[in-house]
């Protein structure tokens, strides 16, 4: 499938049109950003790791019956995906407290959420991705009727599958962010599932194996991504 025009360039990925109106190429860049893009670095190898990890996790989710946009891995940095009408909503699932829920709501770091917590955020850099409710999604027309409830349900299903898969590989899934899109009337998982979008801790030691290593200047950033790839590839 040939790439044609650059349709969209984000902080970590580029989307290209292809010869097929139904398909796009999703290319993973080496750029790492945090804190609304105010922290930025180019980290050699990140694009390849995220493409490989995300491809593997999308395949695994597909095998578990979850509808995703993933078609196949095309190259080291590229995957072929179905074209979706993306919804401007980030869906976060939390199994335990870390990150913004600690800062924003004073949750105790590491406290377990059982059942897992689902949050919606408006995807809008200028507004700093504010927390929104399903009523906001409906009132602002951010998604078709019923999609908020469906995203919540689907996100919890994905959490069950992903958490079990990673636990079997010695990785604790703390939290993660999903983005969905519509293909006609169908809700489909888009974007990526990678250590950029998930908090992953080594189950035995608690060692951080995700983008928090970059956010917090912990060092060993790409080594951790390489280890996540080794674990999920098995
Ligand atoms: P938090 O709300 O604690 O900042 O993030 C919760 C989870 O969602 C973390 O795993 C984090 O990596 C992911 N996440 C939330 N917002 C974004 C975002 O804008 N970009 C990326 N890459 N991940 C995000």
Image (cartoon, helix red, strand yellow):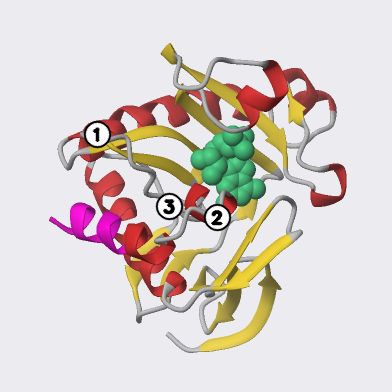
Position of 224 with respect to 180 (left or right) is left
Report the number of discs.
Answer: 3
Q: Position of residue 212 (x, y in %)?
A: 51, 47
- Looking at the image, which residue is at 37% across and 30% down? 159
Question: Quick check: 12 left or right of 66?
Answer: right
3D distance between C-alphas at marks 2 and 3? 15 Å
> What is the distance, in whole Å, between disc 1 and disc 3 at their CAs?
15 Å
Q: Is residue 182 magenta?
A: no
Q: Badge 1 is on which residue? A: 203
Mark 3 sits near ligand 1, with its Cβ under 8 Å away: no
- The first of marks 1 and 2 along the sequence is 1
Residue holding disc 3: 195
For the residue labelled by badge 2, is the local secondary structure a helix, a strand or a loop? loop
Q: Residue at x 35, y 78 (%)?
A: 74
Number of the label disc, if any, that sits on residue 217: 2
Q: In front: 69, or 107?
A: 107
Name the residue nearer the viewer: 10 or 99. Answer: 99
Sequence-earlier tag: 1 or 3: 3
Give the quadrant of the C terminus.
Answer: bottom left
Q: Is residue 77 above or below residue 38?
A: below
Within 10 angstroms of label 2, few (less than 14), some, or many (20 or more) residues? few
Q: Residues within 10 Å of mark 1 (few under 14, many from 20)?
A: some
Tell which tag, 1 or 2, sits nearer the viewer.
2
Mark yes or no: residue 91 visible. no
Q: Which residues are magenta?
A: 226-234
Residue 203: in sight, yes or no? yes
């Amino acid at each position: 499938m040939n790439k044609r025009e650059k349709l969209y360039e984000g902080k970590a990925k580029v989307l290209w049109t292809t010869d097929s109106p139904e398909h796009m190429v999703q290319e993973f860049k080496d750029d790492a950003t945090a804190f609304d893009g105010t922290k930025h670095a180019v980290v050699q190898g990140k694009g390849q790791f995220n493409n490989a990890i995300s491809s593997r996790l999308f395949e695994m989710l597909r095998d578990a019956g979850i509808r995703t946009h993933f078609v196949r891995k095309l190259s080291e940095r590229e995957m072929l995906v179905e074209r979706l009408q993306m919804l401007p909503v980030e869906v976060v699932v939390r199994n335990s407290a870390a990150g913004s829920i600690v800062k924003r709501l004073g949750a105790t770091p590491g406290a377990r959420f059982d059942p897992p917590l689902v949050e919606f955020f408006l995807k809008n850099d200028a507004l700093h991705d504010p927390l929104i409710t399903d009523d906001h999604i409906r009132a602002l027309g951010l998604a078709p009727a019923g999609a908020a409830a469906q995203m919540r349900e689907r996100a919890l299903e994905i959490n069950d599958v992903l958490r079990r898969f990673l636990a079997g590989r010695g990785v604790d899934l703390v939290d993660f962010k999903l983005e969905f899109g519509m293909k006609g009337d169908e809700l489909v998982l888009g974007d990526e599932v990678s250590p950029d979008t998930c908090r992953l801790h080594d189950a035995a030691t608690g060692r951080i194996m995700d983008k928090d290593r970059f956010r917090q200047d912990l060092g060993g950033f790409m080594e951790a991504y390489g280890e996540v790839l080794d674990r999920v590839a098995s």
